[in-house]
Image: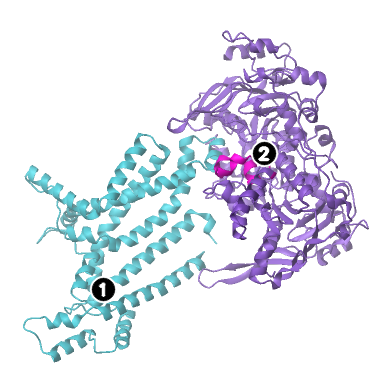
Amino acid sequence: MSTDTVTTTDAAPGERADDAPVLEVSDLTVTFPGLNGGPDVRAVRGVSYTVRRGEVLGIVGESGSGKSVSSMAAMGLLPAHARITGSVRLHGQEILGLDDRDMARLRGRVISMVFQDPLSGLTPVYTVGDQLAEAVLVHDPRTPKGRARERAVELLELVGIPNAEQRYRSFPHEFSGGMRQRVMIAMAMANNPDVIICDEPTTALDVTIQAQILELLHTAQRETGAAIVMITHDLGVVAGFVDRVLVMYAGRPVEMGTVDEIYYGSRMPYTMGLLGAVPRMDLDRQGALVPIKGTPPSLSSLPPGCPFAPRCPIARPECELAEPDLLPIGGQPPAETVRAPHDGEAAPAEDGGQGAGGHRSACVRSGEIAENAWTARDIYPVPEIPDAPASSVRREDRPEMLRVRDLIKHHPLTKGAVFKRRVGTVHAVDGIDFDIREGETLALVGESGCGKSSTLMEIMGLERPQRGTIEVMGQDVSGLSRAKRFELRRDMQIVFQDPMSSLNPRMPVFDIIAEPLRTHGVAASEVTRRVYELIDLVGLNTEHATRFPAEFSGGQRQRVGIARALALEPKLLVLDEPVSALDVSIQAGVVNLLEELQARLGLAYLFVAHDLSVVRHIADRVAVMYLGRIVEIGDTHSIYTRPAHPYTQALLSAIPIPDPEKERTRTHIVLDGDLPSPANPPTGCRFRTRCQKFITLSDREQEQCMTVEPQIRATDGGDQGAACHFAEGRQAV
Amino acid sequence: MGKFLARRLLNYVVLIFLATSFAYLLAATNLYPRGYFEQMQPPPSPEAVNSQLDALNLNDQTPIAQRYVTWVSGVLVGDFGKTIQGGDVTQEMWLKAGVTLRLITVATVLGSAIGIIVGAYAAVRQYRGFDKAATAVSFFVLSVPTVVIALSVQVGANAINDMLGFQLLSYSGEYSAGFQGNGWELFLNRLHHAILPTLVLAVSLFAAFARYQRNMMLDVLSSDFVRTAMAKGLTRRAALFKHALRTALIPTITYFTFTFGILVSGATFTEKIYGWHGMGAWLIDSIFSHDVHVVAAVSWFMAITVMAASFLSDILYAWLDPRVRV
C-alpha cells in the first residue's frame, strides 16, 4: 500500500524538497474493540490527508467525529487495545506500527502535539521548567543540565511568560490556564519539530486568552516552519488560521478543500448545515439559525449508507445504500451505479486524497449542489420565528421583570485550619445595576471569573444581598417571608449549563418535568396534561416521557431542562450558559427553541454566556462584566457595532469570525496577561492593567485611570453606557 | 513551611494531651483496682487495701480530680505512675514499645512496598492476567481475619518443622528462652523469631496496599499529563514511572503513615498468638488486671504514634506534592 504513494511523490516532476509532504496519513482506521462482547467502536474509518512544510491544515468536526483519535493514532498515543490500520508516514517513513521506543524518539522531536486541556496537561508535582527541560533532555540525554535549563528559559520567554527565569521554578498550579497552554506550546516547540498537531488548543480558554494563544501559534509556526494540523470544532478559529480544511463526520472525512472553497462553496450538506448553524457575531439580523435535525450516529452501529443521510435534508434512497467516497465535486458515480449490486468493489478505489487534490466532497449530490449553487438556507428547512408581541411597546413602558441595584457579593478569604481568620476578600460581584423588562433578553457576558455566575446565584437565592437590592416583578426580595419567597420562585426559573449533570439520572423525564408542578401543589391530572404539553412545546416526543436522561443526547437533555424550567409558567427565565456544552449543530436547535419560546410566551431572559456570537444572536441588551463590575451595558446593536469600552472592544475583536475573507483582513486587539485576581483588584479602573487604551494616554490621564473608578455613563445619548473615563465608540468586529 | 509544621505540631500536642486525659479518666472511673486487691488470698484488711491504693494513686475514695492532678503532674515529668503490681510503668512501656516497633516497622515497610509495586503494576496491566491474579490474592487475604492467617501460618510452620525434623521456622516468643550469646548471635536469634509474625502482618498490609495503589494508579493512568509526557518523547514505561507513579504515590504515602500508627495497637492478635510481649498484648492484659495507669500509658503511646505518623505524612505530603506547600 505504501509503494504507490511513494512513487506518486517521487514521480512529481520538478518538485522541490520543501514541497514534499511532511506528514502523510492514508486510509487510517481506528477501532476500539467493544467491551464485554459489545460491538466494536469504529472511531476513525479511512482518513487520508497530507501536510506540507509551513502549511496549516484544519480538521473540523463535532464531538465524536474521530478528529482527535486520528491524530492520537498518528502520534502513537492510543492505548494498546486500539486496532489501527492504514498508513502514517513522516518524511516518507512509515511510523504506524513502530514500537514504543522508536515512536518515542520521534514524538516531541519530529512530530509534537498541543492538547486541549492545559489545566490537567502538566504533571502537578514537577516544576514547569523541569518539565520543559525534560522535553529537551529526553531526546538528547547528553545535553548538560544547565544547557537544557537555559533552553527551557529561552522557550518560556519565546512563548511570552514574563520573568521566565523565576517562573522556571513555578509549579503548574501557580500558572493560569492561558499560561499553562503557553507552556504546552513551548514544550511542543522545544525540539523544532516538523509537524505540530494542535488538538482544540483554545477550547478551554477565554476569548481574550484564545486570541493570545492563536497569535502565539502563528509565532510558533513562523519560528519552526512546522506544518500545523489544527483540530477544532470552532469554525471561527479555523477560518483565519488554516490553508486547507478537512471536515469529518462519524469517523470519516466528508469534505476537503481550501478554506475558501469550504466556507464559500461547500458541497456537502453536513458542512453547509454546520456553517449555517453558527451564530455570527458580525451579522446584525441573521434570522433563525440552521438547525440540523437528529444526532450523529453511534460509532458502534453505523448505518450502511452515508452516515449523514438520516439527518440530511436532501437525502435520496441511494444515499442509504453505500457510503460515498471522498471524490472531486461532481465526480461521484451516478445514482444507477450506486444502486447496482456491488460486484467486488468495482468502483475506482479511493486514491486516499493524498494529493492536495482540490475540493472534494463525500456526497452523491455534490455535483447537483454545485450546479444549483445551493446554500444551507436552500436545502435546510429554517423555522420561522414570530416577532415578540412585546416588541411593539416601548422598552420604558414595559413592566420590570428584574431590577438589580448596586448588588455586591464578597467572599471572605480565610486561612488557618483550627482558628480561621480572614486574610482578604474576593470581590466576586462589586456593585452592579441592571434591569430586565418584559419579553426582553439581557445577556450578561464576560470571561470566567468576572462574576457573572455569582450574580446569577445571588439573584436565584432570593435572599437579602450583602448590599444593594434585588427586585423581582417589582417585589424587593430582602424582606420576603418563606411563603412569599416560595411563591416568587414560580415566576423565576433557571436552566443550567451542563445538561448532563443537572438532570437527576434516576428520574424519568416525566417526573423531572412534573417535579416543580408537584412541589407547588398542582393537581395530579393537571400535572399530566401540563407535562405532555411541555414535552410537545420543547420539541420532544410523547414517548420520551418514560425515558431516563441517559438515553438522550445533550441537546435533548437541554430541552428537558427547558421544559422543567417552563413548567410553572415563569415570566423570567435565567439561562446559565445553556448552549455552551452543546455541539454547534445541536446548539442551533436549542437557540432557535429559546427564541421561539420567548416570542410565543412573552418570556424575559437573563442569559449568562461567554460566547459573544450566541449573545449577539439572541440578546436584546448586553451587559459586559469585568472583575465583578459591569463595564458596558446597552442594546445589542450599539454594543456590537460601536463598542465604547476598551474591554468590550478587545473582547469583540478577539472572537474569530467564521468567514475567511473577513478574518484575514481583521486585526485583533490582543490583550496582555491574565485577569487580575478578584481578591486584589487594581485601584481605580479595574481594567487599566490590561487596557490597550491606557498605554496610549498621557501621564495625567493615566493618573485618573489609576485613582478614580469610572462609573457607567451614557456614551451615545441612548441606552448604551460605558464605565470608562475615555470611552469612545469604535468598530471592533 | 516551617511555621506550618510547627503549628501542626502544636495542634498534635494538644490532641495527644486530650486523648490521654480522656483515656485516663475513662479508665480511672470504670476499672476497679480495689477489686484486684480484695480478691487476693488471703484477703487483706480494708486499711491495707486503702493504703496500697493510695500508694499507687488508685484509690477510688480520693476525688477523681485529685487523682488526675497527681497523675498529670507525674506525666509532665515523664513518670506514668506505677503498675498495679507496683512496677514502673514508664520503664516497662519503653520495653514493650521496642518490641512492637521492631515487629511492625519491618512489616509495614515490607508489606506496603510490595503492595505498591504489585498494585501499580496491576493497574498498568488492568484486566490482564497479572491484574486478575493480584486482585484475587488481595481479596482473599483481605477477607480472612488476621487471627486466622496468624494461626494458619503457625500451624503450617509447625507442620514443616515436623516434616524436616528440626526447627526451621520459629513461631513462639521473641527469642529462645534462656538464650545466651553475643550481640550477633542474639540478633540472628531474634531475626529467626521475627520472620513469621512479620510475614503475617506484611501479608495483610500488602493486600490493602495493592488494592489502594491500584486504584490510585488507575486514576492517573489516563490523565492528560501522562499523555503530555509521552507526547514530548518519553516512552510509555518512562512516562508511567516518572509521571504517573510519582503522582499516584502521594495519597498512598499518607495512607502508609496512618497504617503504621494504627498498627501499634492493631498488631495485638499477632503479638498474642506469636507470644510477643508488645503494646497491644500489654493493653489487653492490663484491662483484665484493672491497671489504670497502664491503660492510660498505652493510650498515650498510641496517640503519640498516630500523631507522629500523621505528622510524618504531612511532611512527606508537602515534600511530594508542591500544591500543599505554603
Q: The residue tagged with tag 2: helix, strand or loop?
A: loop
At x 29% / y 89%, what residue is drawn? B63
Whole-percent x, y for residue A107 in the image: 57, 32
| Quarter assignment of residue A624 | bottom right
Q: How is the image coloured?
A: by chain
Q: The residue tagged with tag 1: helix, strand or loop?
A: helix
Query: Which residue is farthest bottom?
Result: B47
Which label is found at residue A583? 2
| The colour assigned to chain A within the rendered structure | purple
Quadrant into which the C terminus of chain A falls: top right
Q: Is residue B221 above or below residue B83?
A: above
**Chain of the residue where label 1 is placed in the rendered structure:** B
Q: Which residue is mark 1?
A: B295
Q: Nearer the viewer, residue A576 or A135?
A: A576
Whole-percent x, y for residue B160 in the image: 12, 44
| Residue A501 shows in this picture | no
Q: Which residues are magenta?
A: A537-560
Query: In the rendered image, what is the letter of the chain coloured cyan?
Result: B
- Cα separation between marks 2 and 1: 66 Å
| Quarter assignment of residue A459 | bottom right
Tell me the kind of residue under disc 2. Answer: Asp
Q: Is residue A552 magenta?
A: yes
